[in-house]
Image: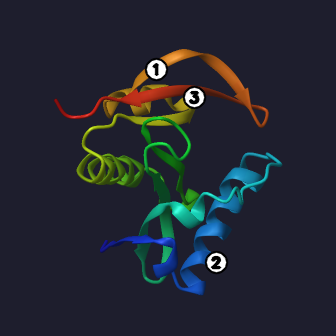
């Protein structure tokens, strides 16, 4: 399987790429997880978008945010893998690419995520450390996790 990875800012996304990203996010976060929430939060415009394509289909997506945008630290968010592409370590590669991007772009900042609580072990394996208690976000248990910057 040949994947095509794309990293770009909002202004570089064409309408088809933006539509695919928003559709995938809605498919997973709203329909699959049965969660009504406002996905369009005015952070996409300032984010770096990392996308994985195969045969013209968007399989994985996340956005990277600069320090001070959502948290004091840099952030990863809207991390999603199409249900048809799960079980192929695509999510692991996606998050690793996000970590690499944020540490290269903002090397003096940790990376913070609001992880769905059931994925805590997955993110821990990638180097994130849980902080605080589980909390409710849009009726889904979440936990904040931090990836420490390079020494």
Label 2 sits on a secondary structure element that is helix
Marking on residue 19: 2
Name the residue beneath numbered marker 3.
Answer: 118
Q: Is the residue under label 3 in contact with that under label 1 (CB below 8 Å)?
A: no
Relative image position of residue 89 (x, y in whole percent)? 36, 50
Q: Quadrant of the C terminus?
A: top left
Near mark 3 (Cα within 10 A), the count class, few <14, some 14-19 or many ≥20, is few
Residue lying at 38% horizontally and 26% vertically, measured from the top left: 124
The way the protein has been coloured in the rendering is rainbow
Residues at marks 2 and 1, CA–CA distance in whole angstroms: 33 Å
Q: Is residue 92 left or right of residue 23?
A: left
Marking on residue 54: none
Residues at marks 3 and 2, CA–CA distance in whole angstroms: 28 Å
Relative image position of residue 69 (x, y in whole percent)? 53, 47
Residues at marks 1 and 3, CA–CA distance in whole angstroms: 12 Å
Name the residue beneath numbered marker 1.
Answer: 130
Between residues 82 and 6, which one lies in front from this camera angle? 6
Which numbered disc flags the more N-terminal residue, 2 or 1? 2
Near mark 2 (Cα within 10 A), the count class, few <14, some 14-19 or many ≥20, is few
Label 1 sits on a secondary structure element that is strand
Residue lying at 53% horizontally and 85% vertically, measured from the top left: 14
Which numbered disc flags the more N-terminal residue, 1 or 3? 3
Label 3 sits on a secondary structure element that is helix
Pick out the residue farthest to the right. 36
Residue lying at 41% horizontally and 33% vertically, measured from the top left: 123
Q: Quadrant of the N terminus?
A: bottom left
Relative image position of residue 38 (x, y in whole percent)? 78, 53
Relative image position of residue 97 (x, y in whole percent)? 31, 54
Looking at the rendering, which quadrant does residue 55 occupy?
bottom left
């Amino acid at each position: 399987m040949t994947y095509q990875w794309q990293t770009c800012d909002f202004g570089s996304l064409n309408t088809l790429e933006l539509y695919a990203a928003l559709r995938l996010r809605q498919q997973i976060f709203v329909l699959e997880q049965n969660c009504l929430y406002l996905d369009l939060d005015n952070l996409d415009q300032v984010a770096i978008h990392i996308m994985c394509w195969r045969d013209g289909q968007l399989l994985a997506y996340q956005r990277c945010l600069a320090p001070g945008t959502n948290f004091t630290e840099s952030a990863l968010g809207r991390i999603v893998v199409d249900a048809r592409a799960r079980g192929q370590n695509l999510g692991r590669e996606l998050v690793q690419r996000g970590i690499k991007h944020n540490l290269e772009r903002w090397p003096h900042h940790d990376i913070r995520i609001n992880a769905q609580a059931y994925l805590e072990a997955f993110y821990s394996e990638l180097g994130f450390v849980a902080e605080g208690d589980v909390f409710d976000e849009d009726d889904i248990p979440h936990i904040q996790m931090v990836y420490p910057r390079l020494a």
